[in-house]
Image (cartoon, rainbow, N blue to C red):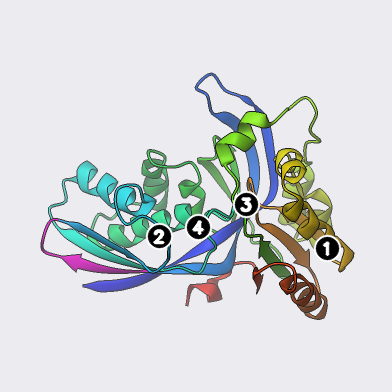
Amino acid sequence: MKMSIKAPAKINLSLDVLYKREDGYHEVEMVMATIDLSDRLYLELLDSDEIILDVKAHFIPEDRRNLIYQAAMLLKDKFHINKGVRITVDKHIPVSAGLAGGSSDAAAALKGLNILWGLNLSTEELAEISGAIGSDIAFCIYGGTALATGRGEIIQPLKRMPSCWIVVAKPSISVSTPSVYKELNLQEVQHPNTTLMLDGIETGDLDKICQATGNVLESVTLQKNDAVKQIKEKMQAFGADAALMSGSGPSVFAIVKQYSRAKRICNGLRGFCDEVYLVRPWSEKSEE
């Protein structure tokens, strides 16, 4: 048996950090949306009891360090599966970009293996299980638009993001998420208006959504990385309706109402940044 499944990237429409918890994690409040920039996973059922991972990209491990491998092992161990799988990954989401590429791949693997191994687990059950290997995976299992709280694993699905264009740009630098959280000073950041963002999504008001965008992690990443700051400033100068860093960076995205303006922003950034994508919010059509 063979199957394929898409693994879409995510953006943070808003990202707030409320406080550091006793367990060492940070309590977060994030509104996230999937976009139609995606990897594709090909899964093949094996009679032999082994996991074979083939990632068509440089610098990505194909062993236990990979979240896909960990996802497959999680299900094998939990449900005593004695069959194996070959998973081939066609990568399109930039690596270490703040777009949840690794988490989305792991979520796609969990959803695919749920079918391939006949586990019949619900979306809620898969999301709960996924917390053992990563906080962002639960959101990626749900997809669409959602509010994520706790350490990011408590998911409340929301209405779909209104139709628009999204320009994503990733500079050729890497950002360490743990170091960004370590340097975050919650006494000095400007917290985003999550209530306004939720209202904008509920009413389908793109202007309100653009007004409510905010990411407290920008206070660290933009200060330390001029390239990220410059991309955001260029997006704003080119006429983006909103521009924001996704996750801990370094990717920045622009929300744009008009295709012509989105195309202009995209073309303007390509002379400055190698990885630039013009996409839409994820929809049912994106599943094809």
Query: What is the spatial separation of the Cα atoms under label 4 and label 3, in whole angstroms?
Result: 14 Å
* Image quarter of residue 27: top right
Q: Secondary structure at mark 1?
A: helix
Q: Residues within 10 Å of mark 4 (few under 14, many from 20)?
A: many
Residue drawn at x 50%, y 40% is 153
Mark with earlier residue (1, 3) = 3
Query: Which segment did they paint magenta?
Result: 41-49
Mark on residue 101? 4
Q: Position of residue 13 (x, y in %)?
A: 70, 52
Query: What is the spatial separation of the Cα atoms under label 2 and label 3, in whole angstroms?
Result: 17 Å
Mark on residue 234? 1
Residue drawn at x 58%, y 41% is 177
Instruction: Name the side, left or right, on which 145 lies relative to 185.
Output: left
Mark with earlier residue (4, 3) = 3
Amino acid residing under circle 2: Ala
User: Which is nearer the eye, 184 or 107?
Assistant: 184
Query: What is the spatial separation of the Cα atoms under label 4 and label 1, in whole angstroms?
Result: 25 Å
Instruction: Name the side, left or right, on which 202 lies relative to 101.
Output: right
The answer, for residue 279, to whether it is visible in the render is no
Q: Does the magenta-highlighted stretch encompass residue 47?
A: yes
Image quarter in which the N terminus is found: bottom left
Q: Which residue is disc 3 drawn over?
A: 32
Q: Which residue is disc 2 drawn over?
A: 108
Amino acid residing under circle 4: Gly
User: Which is nearer the eye, 262 or 54?
Assistant: 54
- 113 vs 198: above or below: below
Q: Position of residue 104 (x, y in %)?
A: 47, 57
Q: Nearer the viewer, mark 1 or mark 3?
A: 1
Q: Residues within 10 Å of mark 1 (few under 14, many from 20)?
A: some
Considering every residue shown, the one lying at the far bottom of the view is 260
Q: Secondary structure at mark 2?
A: helix
Q: Secondary structure at mark 4?
A: helix
